[in-house]
Image (cartoon, coloured by chain):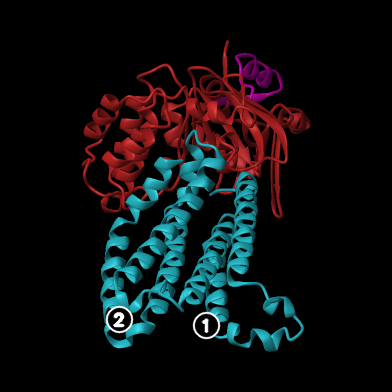
Chain colours: A cyan, B red
Amino acid sequence: MWRLLLKDLYLQKRRIIWTLWIVLILLVAARVVMGDAAPVIFFATAYFLTSIFTLQICYNEEENKGLAFLRSLPLSTREVVSSKFCAMLLVTLLTLAAAFAWSLSLPTTNIFAAGKQETALMLITFGELYLVINSLLIFVYFRWGYARVQFLFSLIMTFLAFGSMSLSRLFPKARFLEAGLTSIQGASTGLATAIILIFLLWIGSIKVLQKKELS
Amino acid sequence: MQIALSMENVSKEYPNFKLQIASLKLPSGSIMGLVGPNGAGKSTLIKAILNLVPLDTGRITVLGRDHLKQEIEVKQLVGYVPEESNLYEEATPAWLGGFVAHYYATWDDTYYRGLLEKFQIPVRRKVKQLSKGGKMKLSLALQLAHRPDLLLLDEPTAGLDPLARRDLLQELLEVIQDEKRSVLFSSHIVGDVEKVADYVTFLKEGSIVLCEDKEKLLEKWRQVQFKVFDSSRREEIANLFTYGKYCGNYFQGITDHFDEELPVRLKELGAENIQAVPLDLEKIMVILSRGGI
């Protein structure tokens, strides 16, 4: 499985390097312009990048008919699916760690400073949400192919950009959204939910790949 | 006789097509050509062996191993070259060799490097920079290098220009006849199959129409033409042939069971100037496809 994971990183190496350079320039520019508000931009960019990486590993397999190639090798479907999930998790965690490290390294933008813990927890919760979204993208890829992944990603991005602002108006009676949990309780519940969802999507992906017809 | 590949009651249904194979057996060490028009089910049949196409019913075994229960083991024994390249375009032959080598216990790196050299494939050039023939040769080298007991070739010469096709076929002939391995080779170019196959299987609309030893097949199928003046015997004569038609007193027929007795019998029935011409595989396939002359 690790070899498959390294394969994804190897095949994406040029794109990863280019993307990191562009992001670095954008982040430096954001910090110069936005000052204390910059960490939120750091994290929003980091989350977005993890989804882009997930889209890329799916696109790369689709473009090269890679699934048919991998399934013709003496490899189990579990290994193929797990490699995609592990690559996504690894890149997401590394990106988040980099974003936190960046944030901590600059005193004016330290989100763990007193009075800013709420921001930190909110960012962690959003990180969990992105892990679930990325897992969902992988599941959709194994089930329906890359075209649907793109469609779903566009919908999610549109919703996150505009729809989330209207959430309380769309669901006025959904009081559980403001159920009075402490931020730590909320983040822990979110983490548990995210783990369960990712596990279910992983199992689902294995099942659908076993039955998938590959051309 | 050991059986390299066995298919029993295999079926796979699509909205407009059904693959239905009652029985197919490939003896070890032999080369079987799978021929038929486009859409006959050749690729589906080959993919089903590797479980790339899940079956509705039926059982497939490779050297006695079930293709579902012992899937990984079966894939260790099989080399599969698809019709269209499915190799990573950004990778190089050297990297692909290293990647694939880890999954096969029998991988022979020296042999792989030798094949790349023989096929004139630069080891450091990216797959996307290779020609279609080059990609096919690379795919073949990757699959041969783990020395599979059963090699599945799905239209390896399709889409290549005549020169590249001839080169590939020549190299293919050298490497597949070099060793004692079984080969299932699909193509809609019958001439390619005729050059390499020991057995020929003809697929039409998802079913096997014919499966036979190539030499026997070519021996038994003949085009026979003669004149008949006695009109009362015409129907009896026509019944001796698989396909046939009259044009005045002239009869032209195809038989799939030619032997020395047939001309004798025809003479008894009043046939004159009998000429029996052997058919090549391509003509036989055209006749089978059309269902007549």
Q: Which dot marks residue A31? A: 2
Q: Residue B28 at x, y = what percent?
A: 52, 17
All told, the count of numbered labels is 2
In the figure, residue B208 lies in which quadrant?
top right
Seen at 31% across and 31% down, the residue is B171
Whole-Å distance between the Cαs marked 1 and 2? 21 Å
Disc on the earlier residue, 1 or 2: 2
Secondary structure of residue under mark 2: helix
Circles 1 and 2, Cβ within 8 Å, touching? The answer is no
| Percent of width and height locating residue A15 | 31, 62
Q: Is residue A111 magenta?
A: no
Q: Foreground residue, B289 or A118?
A: A118
The relative height of residue B182 versus residue B97 in the rendered view (above or below) is above
Camera-side residue: B193 or B144? B144
Chain letter of disc 2?
A: A
Point out the stretch of residues depicted in magenta: B256-276
Above or below: residue A166 compared with residue A157: below
Which chain is disc 1 placed on?
A: A
Q: Dot 1: what SS?
A: helix
The residue furthest front is A114
Which circle marks residue A211 in the picture?
A: none
Is the residue A50 above or below the residue B108 in the image? below
Q: Looking at the picture, does residue A66 appear above or below residue B138?
A: below
Say whether residue B36 is visible.
Answer: no
Q: Label 1, on which residue? A: A161
Instruction: Return the residue nearer the eye: B200 or B68.
Output: B68
In percent of the image, x 26 and y 84: which residue is there?
A32
What residue type is disc 2 on? Arg
Residue B57 visible within the image: yes
Q: Quadrant of residue B74?
A: top right
Few, some or many C-alpha atoms within 10 Å of disc 2 (few <14, some 14-19, many ≥20)? some
Q: Nearer the viewer, mark 1 or mark 2?
A: 2
